Image (spheres, rainbow, N blue to C red):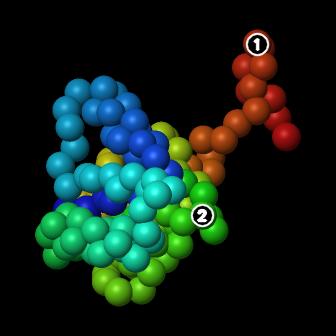
Amino acid sequence: MIGILIISHEKLGDSLIACATHMLGETPQQLSALAVKGDVEPEALLQQAKQMAIELDSGEGVLILSDIFGGTPCNIATKLVSMRQSHGISGLNLPMLIEALSNRHLSLEDCLNKTMNNGQESILHFNEKGCVPL
């Protein structure tokens, strides 16, 4: 099973894990979050992220999810994916996390593609009548 590591600003990752746990009815295995706070050096967080990724990886890789491309959490994730069998996705949202959790029995590349597609397709414009076509 693919491990999933969320690297995000503050407690966003913990909140998304709590939401996923609520929706799925149980705490998903091999899922952790690293909260990036402004008062901690990124290099120290990178070392912590490395250790977390090692613990999450059962041999099938780790999918790293981050909130904003170019932010400190994503910069840490970018360094991490260059060091181990993993892929990263920025723009994390709850549908993306649920999709990743639902497809982590697949190959890392297939899980990555399905997660990215679902994350993008879950962004919809709606009003009181329903979805509004683009």
Q: Could you tell me residue 61's position as x and y percent?
A: 27, 73
Q: Could you tell me residue 37's position as x and y percent?
A: 46, 54
Tell me which residue sits at (23%, 27%) in the image: 25
The dot on residue 128 is 1
Q: Quadrant of residue 82?
A: bottom left
In this view, 53 is above or below 33: below
The dot on residue 67 is none
Q: Could you tell me residue 4's position as x and y percent?
A: 31, 59
Front-most of residues 51 and 93: 51
- Quadrant in which the N terminus is drawn: bottom left
Q: Kindly tell me whether residue 118 is visible in this rendering.
A: no
Horizontally, is 64 left or right of 56 in the view?
Answer: right
In this view, 130 is above or below 134: above
Amino acid at pointer 2? Gly
Q: Kindly tell me whether residue 13 is visible in this rendering.
A: yes
The dot on residue 71 is 2
